[in-house]
Amino acid sequence: MTVHFKQVTIVGVGLIGGSLGMILKQQGLADQVVGVGRTIENLELAIKIGAIDRHVQDPQLVMPGTDLVILATPIESYSGHLKQWGRYLAEGTIVSDVGSVKGPLVEQAESLMPPGVHFVGAHPIAGKEKSGAGAATSDLYQNALCLLTPTARTNAEALGKIRHMWEVAGSNVHSIDPFLHDWILGAVSHLPHVAAFALMNALSDLQQHTKGDAELLNYSGGGLRDTTRIAASSPEMWRDIFLWNKDNLVLMIETLEKHLQRMKSYIQQNDEAGIEHEIAKARDARQRLK
Amino acid sequence: MTVHFKQVTIVGVGLIGGSLGMILKQQGLADQVVGVGRTIENLELAIKIGAIDRHVQDPQLVMPGTDLVILATPIESYSGHLKQWGRYLAEGTIVSDVGSVKGPLVEQAESLMPPGVHFVGAHPIAGKEKSGAGAATSDLYQNALCLLTPTARTNAEALGKIRHMWEVAGSNVHSIDPFLHDWILGAVSHLPHVAAFALMNALSDLQQHTKGDAELLNYSGGGLRDTTRIAASSPEMWRDIFLWNKDNLVLMIETLEKHLQRMKSYIQQNDEAGIEHEIAKARDARQRLK
């Protein structure tokens, strides 16, 4: 399949959007890549590193000539963006995204598409601790999983083009139901973030109850560093993810609470076999995770 | 200070004990290092890699000629060991350990010392995922923290010798009250282990409720891998640590539960500001952890 776009507009040129822009340009997938964003400094930087060709303040002006829009802003802002410039999109245009929640977001985006404009939900599972266009690299998606979330309403040709784009980026592309996506990512990504945030906040509490002037964090080894690495994440981004995946996440937090409660009871009751069984189960499961 | 031992007996020649044995021999801190353990294969391997000079089946036979004993077995076994061969120790001998819990263990060990035998509690904070003498390396303790836990009963000269030994091993040695040690390590090590075990077990539960044949762990990125790395730890070792640090740990698990409960409520109530505040607090705390 030959996939080529005349003009791709990336809304939100951060780490994720900027890296995709670099790939679109380097791989010759687009004649022109336009950036839309809130801060001029970041957009100028994006031009300098080759993530976009130019940027505009009024997305309305470029949307009629755009054949692919990538939404790479916080998921909560999707509807505001689509309401602002959706009606300027030409028939046949594809709108795709990179958001970490899919089910209700895809439903919303589909409902906001003008006639003849095709939405394709996508979630490249990649990232690093740094953010902004300055952190973008053209190998960010190499060997990373990229999940596409087609529905009964998804245009097959548009889906094929988005799949091709992510394959060219080096990703392992899989299609999955958008609501199943949210269940799975809730378990393997959102819940671990909740746990890491709660653990850091518990440590802050415990610091307050520490005798003398001992600084707890001065005594930590690699274990705590690894366990809480993802706690250094964006509050705005994760607030939105938690709320958009609310029902799954509440149930999952309760599942985690159940296991903490169980371990606590075993410890309180000096139940050696119970503790050992819980740890052995966890260890065996962890050893299956390569 | 010149510190030299005629004969060091290491009880439990695994990763920790074996690495210390290699250092004692390579640095010329001991004329002879004797190993005591349960499996001959492991002890033979320890000789081969230069962690010990020889091994014995009956520790009683070597204890009279030993001037330093290192207890490097699971903490639950300390009293059994001390009762088996403690009475054969000569006056002036030092007994030290490497255990992850100190307060009640140090009290117990001190109460089991024969007259004139000096106990010095020590906890080198080092380790890796592999275990056994085969994983031992002479640089394991380089730049690692090593906590000594003297009490009012600790012999100053014995303490100085143990400090010197760990400094020669390359550790940053600090002295700390044994009960404060347990509070601190409870927070920065034992609680993160509880959290990692509970998270893995929660994921196993959630897998059971996953539609179709999707394997949750196939969708995980680096976040889950880091967060749960320490879940692949020894059930026996951690069972003992949890029970010996029971009172601290129960309170700490409750602190973690409180923060999970709080985040869950904010999510249930769509409290955007509350969620964002909790995450920002966690992120700020995590950013202070280098």
Image (tube, coloured by chain):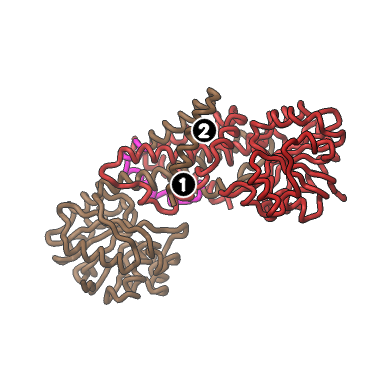
Chain colours: A red, B brown
- A80 horizontally vs B207: left or right: right
Percent position of residue A270, x then y: 33, 39
Percent position of residue B201, x then y: 51, 40
In the picture as drawn, the residue positioned furthest to the left comes out as B115
- Under tag 2, what secondary structure? helix
Q: For the N terminus of chain B, which image quadrant?
A: bottom left
Which labelled disc corresponds to residue B276? 2
Quadrant of res A60:
top right
- When the figure is inspected, residue A59 is found, relative to residue B170, above or below; the finding is above
Say which residue appears at 35% left-offset and 51% top-offset: A219
B228 part of magenta stretch = yes
Q: Which residues are magenta?
A: B227-252
- Please tell me which residue lies in front, A214 or B32: A214
- When the figure is inspected, residue B34 is found, relative to residue B116, above or below; the finding is below
Q: Amino acid at mark 2?
A: Glu
N-terminal label among 2 and 1: 2
Mark 2 residue crowding within 10 angstroms, few (<14) / some (14–19) / many (20+):
many
Q: Which residue is mark 1?
A: B287
Q: CA distance from mark 2 to mark 1?
A: 16 Å
- Please tell me which residue lies in front, B289 or B160: B289
What chain does mark 1 sit on?
A: B
Mark 1 residue crowding within 10 angstroms, few (<14) / some (14–19) / many (20+):
few
- Please tell me which residue lies in front, B153 or A261: B153
B249 part of magenta stretch = yes
Q: Main secondary structure of the magenta part?
A: helix
